[in-house]
Image: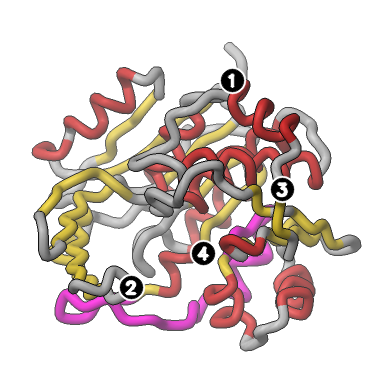
Amino acid sequence: MDRTELVCIGHITHDKVVTPRQVVHMAGGTAFYFSNAVSKLDLRYKLFTALAPADMPSVYDLQASGIDVTVLPSAHTVFFENIYSGNQDHRTQRVVRQADPFSAAQFAGVDAGFFHLGPLLSGDIPVALIRALAEKGKVSLDAQGYLREVKNQNVLAIDWCDKIEALRHIHTLKVNEHEMAVLTGQKDVRTSAMILADWGVKEVVITLGSMGSVVYDGESFFTIPAYIPTTSVVDATGCGDTYMAGYLYQRIKGAAIQEAGEFAAAMATLKIEGSGPFTGTKDDVLALLSSRKATVCP
């Protein structure tokens, strides 16, 4: 049997979004958006998640898209409540329930070339699991969850106390500009990237929103443009997850960093033009790249 090329580990969430006009319930989380994007690409892929039985319909939807999903036991599903005022830039976020954390023992028999980890909260994925996976394949990490702590259902910003121990096992690290600054104490992108590389990360991916992204491999910096949407920005949720799906896909298939980054950026642009997860195709991404749309570079 062919070896699994990519495994994602992360909780699918139950998101409640409250605005002055409506209340919407939907699935979410890194695992959800990442998996939907990967389902459009030709990879041997598996998702491992954990959620309560009542939220299994979100898993059935992924399986209907051809995703191989293993659901690990959990008493609860991660339940995020996002409350927006009339000003959409102002959000109050609460975590009503948390899912059970993952453990190294649960993945003793799981093998893959690449593992992508999508923790949403600081206790989701212990360092012991990162260390165990790194002995089997390359580990990719979206660091956002390690910088969130829940107290009395409120989400608090924290530093990651185990970062030095954990990051030496990480091949590819994805952070945004804010997360980068929290981890390194530096606001300069290149300085931060070099610090993260000194801590052991092989490829540092720093996303900068509409200003593009930067990748550092310990020797060279790669400047990745942000492709301008042809329509208005509809929904930015999950753009970073979509970017990483495209980036890892290309790297696994042998693409160089610059090519992988540009493919990832184009994929994220297509996602931002619509609501919900990525619904395009690889051909759509390639068409955008060949059209040479005007870009903004970091």
Indicate the colouring scheme.
Answer: secondary structure
Q: Where is residue 207 in the image (x, y as percent from the top left)?
A: 61, 61
Left or right: 254 in relation to 156? right
Lower position in the chain sequence, tag 4 or tag 1: 1
Q: Position of residue 233 (x, y in %)?
A: 44, 51
Q: Where is residue 20 in the image (x, y as percent from the top left)?
A: 11, 65
Which kind of residue does numbered mark 3 sit on? Answer: Ala
Determine if the magenta segment contains residue 165. Answer: yes
The numbered dot on residue 42 is 1
Quadrant showing the N terminus = top right
Which kind of residue does numbered mark 2 sit on? Answer: Asp
Dot 1: what SS?
loop
Crowding at dot 1, Cα within 10 Å, few <14 / some 14-19 / many 20+, comes out as few
Give how far apart the Cα atoms at labels 3 and 4 are: 30 Å
According to the image, label 2 marks what residue? 89
Q: Are marks 4 and 2 in contact (CB under 8 Å)?
A: no
According to the image, label 3 marks what residue? 294
Q: Give the range drawn in magenta.
A: 149-175
Lower position in the chain sequence, tag 2 or tag 1: 1
Q: Do the residues labelled 3 and 1 touch (CB within 8 Å)?
A: no
Dot 4: what SS?
helix
